[in-house]
């Protein structure tokens, strides 16, 4: 009960510190920033795929959950939690310790390393760029909602390509 009261008292402060603010008019810039970022990411991803051998047709690489659960979690839940971790808490921790580029570099590197798996090392430049774009959007808008929006659109595209088998 005491912990519940403690978290309720500091909840607005916590959201503010990690970057959740009321969206401003500048968020309309996302209408051109998201398509530009997607174009850059698609080109980088295609270039990285040239260096990867196709994944084996092994059951371990197939989704374990139903398609609707996979789609909902990958397009909504995962972007929100990753942005809170990488561009919220980690940004807040590093802001006082690093400069602008150090902040972007460390958060991008941690994001990229968090997405590495077996055989995915050639995708490291793609994940670094992805983390950099999410960080730039976050810093440009001074709002975590902007990077959550971009991350959601990127993951939604990945989900659609995965489900369509592209």
Image: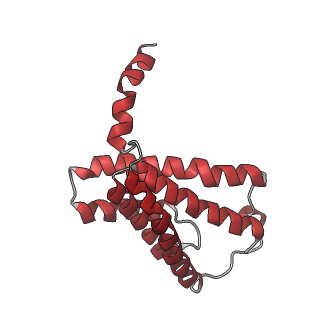
User: Picture quarter containing residue 5?
Assistant: top left
Color theme of the render: secondary structure
Q: Nearer the viewer, residue 141 or 51?
A: 141
Residue that sits furthest to the front in the current view: 25
Q: Residue at x 56, y 64 (%)?
A: 154
Residue that sits furthest to the top in the current view: 1
Q: Residue at x 39, y 66 (%)?
A: 132
Q: Nearer the viewer, residue 152 or 109?
A: 152
Q: Residue at x 70, y 65 (%)?
A: 160
In this rendering, position of residue 5 left or right of residue 43: left
Q: Nearer the viewer, residue 90 or 62?
A: 90
In this rendering, position of residue 96 left or right of residue 55: left
In this rendering, position of residue 108 left or right of residue 103: right
Locate residue 127, reporting x and y percent.
48, 69
Q: How many marks?
A: 0
User: Picture quarter containing residue 129?
Assistant: bottom left
In this rendering, position of residue 124 left or right of residue 119: left
Indicate the quadrant containing the C terminus: top left, top right, bottom left or bottom right: bottom right
Locate residue 70, reporting x and y percent.
70, 53
Locate residue 130, reporting x and y percent.
46, 67
Locate residue 8, reporting x and y percent.
41, 22
């Amino acid at each position: 009960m005491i912990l519940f009261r403690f978290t309720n008292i500091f909840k607005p402060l916590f959201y503010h510190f990690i970057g959740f603010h009321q969206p401003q008019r500048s968020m309309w810039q996302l209408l051109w920033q998201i398509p530009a970022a997607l174009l850059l990411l698609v080109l980088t991803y295609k270039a990285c795929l040239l260096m990867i051998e196709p994944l084996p047709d092994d059951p371990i690489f197939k989704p374990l959950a139903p398609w609707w659960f996979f789609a909902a979690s990958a397009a909504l839940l995962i972007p929100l939690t990753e942005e809170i971790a990488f561009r919220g808490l980690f940004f807040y921790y590093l802001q006082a310790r690093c400069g602008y580029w150090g902040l972007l570099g460390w958060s991008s590197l941690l994001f990229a390393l968090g997405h590495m798996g077996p055989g995915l090392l050639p995708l490291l430049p793609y994940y670094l760029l992805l983390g950099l774009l999410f960080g730039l959007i976050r810093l440009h808008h001074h709002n975590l909602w902007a990077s959550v929006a971009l991350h959601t659109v990127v993951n939604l595209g990945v989900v659609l390509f995965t489900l369509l088998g592209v």
